[in-house]
Amino acid sequence: MMAEHIHALPDGYRLHEYELIRVLGAGGFGITYLCFDHNLDQARAIKEYLPADLATRVSGQSVRSNSTSAQDDFDAGLNSFLVEAKMLARFEHRNIVKVHRCFSDNGTAYIVMEYAEGDTLDSILKEQGTLDEQTLLSILLPIMDGLDRVHAQKTLHRDIKPGNVIIRDSDNSPVLIDFGAARQAIESKSRSITAIITAGFAPFEQYSTYGNQGPWTDIYALGAMAYLALCGEKPPEAPLRMRNDPMIPLSKRCAGKASPAVLAAIDWALRPYEEERPQSIAEWRAAFDGSPVHRPAANLSDSDQTVKIPARPDKPAQAPSASSVQEAAAPAKRNVALWAGMATVTVAAAAGIFYFMGSASTPAGFMLPPTIVLPAGDFVMGSEPGTGDPDEWPSRRVTLAAPLEMGQKEVTIGEYRLFADATGQVAPRGDASLPVTGISWNDAKAYAIWLSERTGARYRLPSEAEWEYAARSGTGSAWPWGEQADGAQVVCAGCDDATPTGPVSADTGSRVTWASGNLFNMHGNVWEWVEDCARDSYVGAPVDGSVWTSPEAGACSRILRGGSWREPPPLTRSAFRDWKPADTRDDDIGFRLVKEAAR
């Protein structure tokens, strides 16, 4: 029923000649309804543009962006949503969902499509387990043919998975639905990492801000779908495959279940690195027949231009220049030189904490964020009703059963610059001792996972409860030193009558004192991302200090703590909470990390 989706339009609602019947599906960027076309007496599907992180339903069923800063991204996605509809309407292909019209209403836009009555491939696989070769090819090859037409128009699907393939009841033909142009437009405009990744089906380049996406991206997803259909398990998440790939090739795992050419073609599509995959549907299609594929390749001799899909060669190590790293004084400062190496950057693909595990020791010459160990303990989190803000209610006692190794300061430009240099991103500018800012939640996660892989330790963002435990230092007052921000060197607008114009060095400013040392700038200076999804109260919150996510964690807004240099004093309280979409990059947002104990 529609009422089960919080933002869905009600059943019976009329959009022009279309009467909505029920929700067919919903994701991070929209809701799809079954409807009845009263002009033509036919069932249709209508997709409504409603990006969960950028907009919400308001009174009168209209859609409005969540904030002024979100409006530009909302508009960019809306424009691409309509452009996608017009592009798909030009196609008359049996295996690509047919678009009949699009229109604007309720402050957003709608695409009217054919209603392909049938089961998704996902539901079929859950019921049957696996498919034989003939059945698989009867699904895969027609979709490839339709997708080739789409690629010719410089358009990608970007979210191919069994749930987006419907097998028609009428003739068992497959149809590919739910293209992702709006998602890509928002990602491109905000320079963020894609908010929604379908683990197992998304290739590595979709996890990166600067991922090189192309036809090979959709080909990987189709290969992953075929892998699942033949062996009953989807491939491991792409980031796990970049080092010591755990995936068993289909040609070994399902030998004898399908022809060697088909198994080899699917394995080719699932190469972790995009340059090693087929570069077009036509190139991949030829491999299913066992035909040798010919294309120029720089790593092949002139006498051998047949592509044999060689293993990716190791890249030469490149070290950051000496000028890119400056000493950042801190109580736990380590003596460091420069580390040279090639890094792989990923982001978390699902709710919770995800890590790469690297070598057992820190590479020589690596700059690590300094930490101090806080003892296990309990505290009262939040504010009592009538004090603080309503989203800090109800207060509750939270217990951290194990010690917590918290970053002493916000991650600095110097520390983050190593990551940027190693991964080919634009390096932040400025004094290396300043906190790095303009960092999205996605960026912070990528840095933590990269640092974990490079060092063999486990680094992550703190949970919201861990952050507040560290900020309070055993106190119950608004700030750990009392009920006023003044007199504690808090870097904020109006603290000590100051008017700062930016953050200060990460190891100056306010201090929270613990027996093991000081934590710098937990209050003021820059906002700090934590792991948790945004909620407007603590009703139902965990009491063990763990991360509080949601079923839609990949698309949720994320919590910010601590206030910043441009905020008034009340916003720097220990209990104050804010949240923004995970791709937000403001000049007063940074982060600090937690280092987990070895297991």
Image (spheres, grey):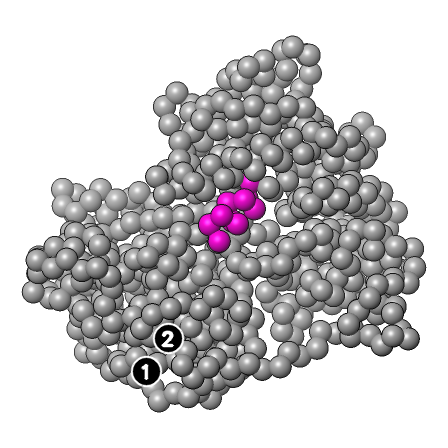
Left or right: 510 in relation to 301: left
Residue type of the residue flagged with mark 1: Glu
Q: Secondary structure at mark 1?
A: loop
Residue sitting nearer the eye, 34 or 292: 292
Left or right: 194 in relation to 42: left
**18 lies above or below 334:** above
Residue on which the image places disc 1: 327
| Residue 196 coordinates in the image, percent (x, y) | 54, 49
Q: Residue at x 78, y 62 (%)?
A: 268
Q: Is residue 355 visible?
A: no
- What distance separates the C-alpha of mark 2 from that of mark 1? 8 Å
Question: Image quarter for residue 459?
Answer: bottom left
Q: Is residue 53 visible?
A: yes
State whether the magenta stretch is mostly helix, strand or loop.
Answer: helix
Which residue sits furthest top? Answer: 39
| Residue 553 coordinates in the image, percent (x, y) | 46, 50
Residue type of the residue flagged with mark 2: Gly
Magenta-colored span: 182-191
Residue on which the image places disc 2: 414
Disc number at residue 205?
A: none
**408 lies above or below 339:** above
Q: Residue at x 50, y 45 (%)?
A: 186
| Residue 327 coordinates in the image, percent (x, y) | 32, 82
